[in-house]
Amino acid sequence: MGKGNRNAMPDDYTDSPIRKIGILTSGGDAPGMNAAIRAVTRTAIFYGREVVGILHGYKGLIENNFKPLNSGDVSNIIQLGGTILKTARSMEFRNVEGRQMAFQNIKNAGIDALIVIGGDGTFTGARIFAQEYGVPIVGIPGTIDNDLFGTDFTVGYDTALNTIIEAVDKIRDTATAHERLFFIEVMGRDAGFLALNGGIASGAEAVLIPETDTDLTTLEKLIKSGYRQNKNSSIVLVAEGEKAGGAFNIARQVEKDYPQYDVRVTILGHIQRGGSPTASDRILASRLGVAAVETLLEDQQSVMVGIENDQISLVPFNKAIKYDKEVNHKLFDSIRVLSS
Ligand code: F6P
């Protein structure tokens, strides 16, 4: 098949020297990582390749924590949250010595190439490792934050969004019953995708994200006008990386300025990272898993496989890491209109 022509029937990639593929998950886990592990394993086996699971991300690479994966090992995991390979944020892999040990271990195990599933940090490690040792590596975007450039969606984002709206719906019940103003903090250290789209989907009055400056005066006016129009409760979604100091600080300030409001704060926290992946995340993870193996066998490396306009995209690690994916600022206007 022509390189990149994914509508053609797959060939068997007999020309590719890659016989054994290592797979790992790294950084924060995301629902759908297991579906991606399954897809990678099954695809590699389909093409007659061997698969080795590396436990605990880059830490396992350094500590030689490997286990062979066969088709049966990835049965019944498509619906599971977390990652059967475990994950970690490895400090040792940031050091030359750590990466040297990792390379020795994959060489000894006969691993020819790697597929890494994770976010920014995962691809940064992969890029350096590939540069230093020439190991072919392909990445799959797996993070609930959806903050990777070159892909419309990352694995785990849709499930986290659904968890958020389920939680906000419940909070809205009690907020309405008590006529309270709730500040709900969602994940997103550096990115506001979860807050912004979670805000639209849950009917929030306002959303605060790291990408824009928080203007408390405007926020307070907005809340005030909402109450004036006989709303008996208000929900404001705050991304954890928001610049005015987070949900608790903002709530304290608003309470001070408007003592008549009954204010509460809820931090959703790691509940957003767990749970069974949605259909969208399972489909995305499965498609990206197939694409990752085919990309490696087509002799491409140091790229992330992503999805753009429903088509598989290949994004060099450099770009995926370096460029910021922009949130759609027009969504703020929609929130203002919809909460009026
Ligand atoms: O990167 C994913 C993410 O869930 C962020 O949204 C969050 O800030 C971070 O991970 C939390 O990481 P940890 O679980 O290590 O505290």
Image (cartoon, rainbow, N blue to C red):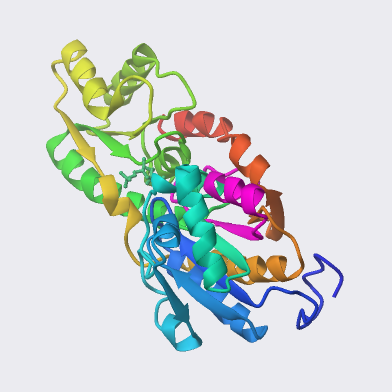
Q: Is residue 41 left or right of residue 88?
A: right
Which of the two residues, 274 or 172, is positioned nearer the viewer here? Answer: 274
Which of the two residues, 59 or 178, is positioned nearer the viewer here? Answer: 59
Q: Is residue 142 visible?
A: no
Extreme-bottom residue of the structure: 72
Q: Position of residue 288 (x, y in %)?
A: 60, 65
Residue 304 position by quadrant: bottom right
Q: Quadrant of ligand 1?
A: top left
Q: Position of residue 129 (x, y in %)?
A: 58, 50
Residue at 78% from the left image edge and 82% from the top image edge: 14
The quarter of the rendered structure image containing the C terminus is top left
Q: Which residues, given as a range, are shown in magenta?
A: 124-152
Q: Is residue 144 left or right of residue 268?
A: right
Q: Position of residue 329 (x, y in %)?
A: 56, 30
Q: Position of residue 120 (x, y in %)?
A: 52, 44
Q: Is residue 193 visible?
A: yes
Extreme-right residue of the structure: 2
Q: Is residue 274 above or below residue 45?
A: above
Residue at 33% from the left image edge and 40% from the top image edge: 186
Q: Is residue 104 above or below residue 324?
A: below
Which of the two residues, 262 or 141, is positioned nearer the viewer here? Answer: 141
Task: Tally the marks.
Answer: 0
Residue 273 position by quadrant: bottom left
The quarter of the rendered structure image containing the N terminus is bottom right
Residue 286 position by quadrant: bottom right
Q: Is residue 238 left or right of residue 291?
A: left
Is 116 within the magenta?
no
Residue at 47% from the left image edge and 63% from the top image edge: 24
Q: Is residue 271 left or right of residue 327?
A: left
